Image: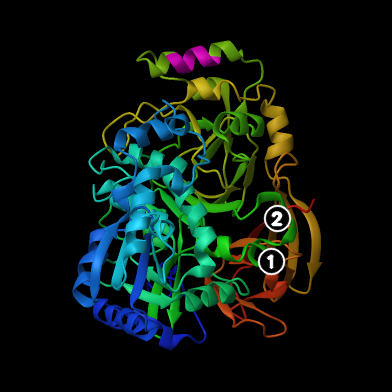
Amino acid sequence: MNNGQFNITPCIEIKGYRDQCWQGWSAIGFQLAYAIRRSNQAKIVLAVECYPGVRQEAILTPLWDLLPLNRVYPSQEIFLSPKEIEDLIQLDLTDDPVFGRISPLRMNDFFDAQKQRDLTAKIASIESGAVLIIGPGASLIHEPDILIYADLPRWEAQWRFRRSESDNLGVKNRHEPAPQQYKQAFFVDWRVADRLKRDSMERWDYWLDTVQSDSPKMTTGEAIRGALQQTARRPFSVVPYFDPAPWGGKWMQEKFGLDPSQDNFGWSFNGVPEENSLLFDFQGVVVESPAINLVFYQPKELLGEYVFRRFGAEFPIRFDYLDTMDGGNLSFQVHPTEEYIRKQFGMAYTQDESYYIVDAGEDACVYLGLREGIRSQEMIESLFAAQNGGPSFNADRFAKRWPARKHDHFLIPAGTPHCSGRNAMVLEISATPYIFTFKLWDWGRLGLDGEPRPIHIHHGKKVIQWERHAEWTRRELINRVEAVGAGLGWREERTGLHELEFIETRRHWFTSAVPHHTQGAVNVLCLVQGESITVESPNGSFEPFVVRFGEVFIVPAAVGEYTISPNDPNPKQECVTIKAFVRSE
């Protein structure tokens, strides 16, 4: 808990199901052995469906020792050859070092059809004993009598790539560069596995938390589904994910109590269900579930009807931190227009975003929009020249630099060149396709791996909206504050985003309780000023939820009415929250 500071391990208390959770391989093996005996069948088929990145051998070895297994069949036995898989996914991966296309493939597409038929027939011919099928796609090979889903959050999968501990789906490539593995996972592996996960969730007999291989946790399928149902009806926070960056600063280390031995923490994903996880406390047994499971299993309750209708089972809002305090400028960049991202990469919407300044040094700034009178061709030529070893790109010559102060809000619709300068603590509020950033200039520096970071001028030049000059930017994109409501001890302001973007943001300043309502859409909030607040239900539908400075929290659409109050009855300064939601159709 870091002595009352930012909570880096927010945990959700789950009511019930205590007798449906097990910790450690001995307890897990005992329960599965009991389930086998209880089935009273001559032959029983167990399938352990593994999310990509799960350490399959760390599951198989203890289960072989603990269960009365007669035969074990890894699903990889029926996968296509690595060369065939490479050919299968090449259209989605493309030759670009960073970007690909969202794959439409399904797990069956990775199987050799004849090998699958042969293995299915072999298992069907077995008359007695316990048979285990394990690996990605295991549940598709033969209808299991007991289905166990072995799960893993994406952030842990990424760490395993970095440590050369994990392969991509169907291949042996753990020693390839981590960015290359991540690209294949993002565009192919996770899409394929997520489709199978969504299709199978109601059929899970057991769910296995594999984040810590030496300390696994297992729940019944009923218990993990019940935890997701409870979470979709109360405010919650995901487990934040912190990462260093070439431009990273020191603010989060100090304010959030992070490891002081690290050089920096430039990133924090703390409102990104695709990346983050949820901690569920089943009366003493704490399990870690990918937060995306909540989006998949309770999409309407979490997102709301009209958000679900527009985006499907995807979480469209992202909150993350960009820390450049005592660091450096972010890369000068632009995001693709909706038409371009749809045509080139198969994404349904683009990364419109904004920078909310949580804290700032005296020299903090944001580059946003273009200077009056510049020539587009000259700017592009200067960018290419800098990238090819020529003179450094003079950002101030082409882009407009604006001073940044605490509580400023800079709106960044797609197609607008931008970046935060050094000595700013930015809460980035954006749409979710976060990988699609076209870097135009990275200030001549190297990445943390000592290599130049990829630059995407060839993409960026096709989406820059050249008419977004300084006057338009000042009028349309900076501190567009509009008073929309007030009450006893509180006031509400609209701060954006721009009309071109689908996210609305509201800021509340308050010294007493503030009424809120989800209005049928998921709300994402952050306490950007004040020590701590409490989120409560006027009708007692959920337990009071405490939020500390800097923490991001999500209020599902199903919550409806809620209040936010300062925990100090006589605060020294106003508390401030920033709230984002999808505008109604």
For the residue pair 403 and 254, the one nearer the viewer reads as 254
Left or right side of 97 for 71: left
Query: Percent from the top left, x then y, of residue 422?
Result: 45, 40
Left or right side of 4 for 131: left
Dot 2 amino acid type: Val
Residue 295 position by quadrant = bottom right
Q: Which residue corresponds to mark 2?
A: 307
Which residue is rendered at x = 48% and y = 38% of the image? 421
Within-10-Å neighbours for mark 2: few <14, some 14–19, many 20+: many
Asked whether residue 42 appears in the rendered view, the answer is: yes
Query: Percent from the top left, x then y, of residue 81?
Result: 30, 38
Dot 1 amino acid type: Ala
Colouring used for the render: rainbow
Residue 474 position by quadrant = top right
Residue range (magenta): 379-384
Q: Secondary structure at mark 1?
A: helix
Asked whether residue 263 appears in the rendered view, the answer is: no
- Asked if disc 1 and disc 2 are in contact, CB closer than 8 Å, the reply is yes
Q: Which residue corresponds to mark 1?
A: 557
Left or right side of 274 for 114: left
Q: State which quarter of the image contains the N terminus.
A: bottom left
For the residue pair 566 and 451, the one nearer the viewer reads as 451
